[in-house]
Amino acid sequence: MTTRLTRRGLLRSGLQVTLAGAVVSVAAVAQAEGEKSCLDGKINDGLAQSLNFTEHSTTPNQTCGNCGLFSGAAAGCGQCQIFSASVNSRGHCDSWAAR
């Protein structure tokens, strides 16, 4: 007996592989980073969203750790004056200001 491949079957299996790959990728990145989220639940989500806050900056020379509004170690968690909350030193938002 031979198995007949259909377009629907191929799309369904392709979607399953894509979703599984995405889950594995996210888990691998989290494990590779080896760090927990610094957000302590007190961050103003509306403000964070409006300032495009992210826990991992895409601009290496503009991170929370080297921002004038951040207090704490250059690595790990620290306090942000804008958000009045604990944030990751690798993070970034539109209010970044050089020290």
Image (spheres, rainbow, N blue to C red):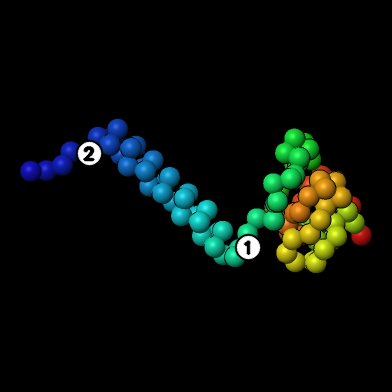
Is 73 placed above or below 84 here? below
Marks 1 and 2: which is nearer the front? 1
**Relative image position of residue 93 (x, y in whole percent):** 79, 47
Look at label 1 and name its amino acid. Glu
At 69% from the left edge and 56% from the top edge, which residue is drawn?
38
Taking the image as drawn, is residue 92 in sight? yes
What is the distance, in whole Å, between disc 1 and disc 2 at their CAs? 44 Å
Residue furthest toward the left? 1
At 46% from the left edge and 55% from the top edge, which residue is drawn?
24
Per the image, the residue denoted by label 2 is 5
Per the image, the residue denoted by label 1 is 35
**Relative image position of residue 85 (x, y in whole percent):** 78, 50
Question: Which of 13 and 56 lies nearest the eye of the viewer?
Answer: 56
Look at label 2 and name its amino acid. Leu
Taking the image as drawn, is residue 60 in sight? no
At 63% from the left edge and 63% from the top edge, which residue is drawn?
35
**Relative image position of residue 91 (x, y in whole percent):** 74, 54
The local crowd at label 2, few if under 14, some if 14 to 19, many if 20 or more residues have their Cα within 10 Å, is few
> Does 23 sit left or right of 60 as displayed?
left
Quadrant, the N terminus: top left
